[in-house]
Image: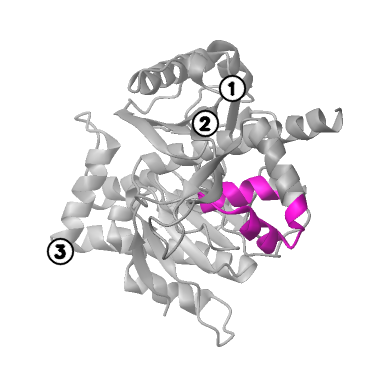
Amino acid sequence: MSSVRRTQRPEGRLGCGPLIPPLSESLRPLRQQVFERIRAAGQIARSQIAKELSVSPASVTTLTQELIEAGLIEEISAPRENEAGRGRPAVALGVRAEAHRVVGLKLSDGSLSAVITDFAGNHLADHVLDRMPEPLTPAEAVSLIDMLVDTVTAKIGMTRRDLSAVGIAMPGFIESSSGTVLWSSVLAEIHVPLADLAGSRLGVPVFIDNDANLCALAELWFGAGRGRSDFAVVTIEQGLGMGLVLNHRLYRGARGLGMELGHIKVQLDGALCRCGQRGCLEAYTADYALAREATVALNLTNRDGRPMKVLLESLYDHAKAGNGAARSIFRRAGRYLAVGLSNIVNLFDPELIILSGERMRFDYLYASETLAEMENLAIRTGKPLPPIEISTWGHLLWAQGAAALALSAISENLLLSTRESFAAQ
């Protein structure tokens, strides 16, 4: 049976970004590969870069000198192993952390979070607050973004003028290439060019993507997925989402709208999903699905104005106290989740599946019965199923992924401009 273990937000890590094995990538420009090696390692010698990329030391010296002159990396003194205090220190390369700073935001139905990181991916400050789960007009959303950016930058004595970019994670159908929110439970309107609207207000580039995608990006850059070539992240909160990493890169699909696990159909003409269709997986596993079942089975209602979070906590308490109806609600949701997880295994054969989101405290959703059901539904090959990890990063996971999105975007733009600059000389 598939194993389950918990993974926490890493502390004291060195470097950020995917840890790609040597000699496994050749399609990306060499300058970008060199920079990404340095960023992922935290600090690394030129000779090691040449060895890992199988290129000449002279090529590495030329490219790294260009990156130094562009202000993207710097030389770092590093003590030689077993030679402490003797001779000149070795010289390594590292990302110039103070070169750029970005903010990552998560906008969701019930909470907001923000982080600020430097160019090397170091966490500088964060901010989390709750909000009423009501759809926002585009203007209200931009005002919230504006407030969050000002609040988190002020914590370290900065302003938006000190930022190079802002990344935003949101639930829904997001066209990340254009920054357009086609539909989101957070917004009261559809087809909103939110990246352009927020960018005009903030005065810095803004990048937006689906929150489950950015959850996967956070794991790829900072968490359990750094050394994995292929893994999936399933998020369970107000909805059910999925992010997929293939060959160390986030996969979005041909139109940038793929991996909508929550909207695969598990019951024809079934329960109504918030997307407007029926029978979606999300309509049986997300918080509003659990609340719907609770109001029927336990006669729990929101007539007294209790937030859905309180309603779900009451349902969970009933289940833990042995209430059969409450336990059956979670078990039913777990069985539907097992359907989704087995489909991931059958379609993508990932190395790892990470479950994340606020609902992961409801351990019934990944109980042994759920894992056994997943194993029964997966294709039987005699090979072990991928391990399952429960992420306990909390609210900041999505915002950290949004920061990684911003870092990735500005890095690629800077590397492109650096190449054009030196080519013109």
**Mark 3 nearby-residue class (10 Å; few <14, some 14–19, many ≥20):** few
The kind of residue tagged 2 is Ile
Image coordinates of residue 31 in percent, x first then y, are 73, 45
Q: Residue furthest left?
A: 321
Circle 3: element type: loop
Residue at the location (56% across, 24% down)?
164
What's the distance in space between the residues labelled 1 and 3, CA to CA?
46 Å
Which mark's residue is nearer the viewer, 1 or 3? 1
Q: Are marks 1 and 3 in contact (CB under 8 Å)?
A: no
User: Which residue was labeled with disc 1?
Assistant: 194
Image coordinates of residue 250 in percent, x first then y, are 62, 50
Q: Magenta residues, as a range?
A: 33-58
Q: Residue furthest bottom?
A: 382
Circle 1: element type: helix
Front position in the image: 344 or 144: 144
Residue at the location (50% across, 35% down)?
97
Image coordinates of residue 198 in percent, x first then y, are 56, 18
The kind of residue tagged 3 is Gly
Front position in the image: 240 or 146: 146
User: Which residue was labeled with disc 2?
Assistant: 168
From this viewpoint, is residue 322 visible?
Answer: yes
Provide the major secondary structure of the magenta segment: helix
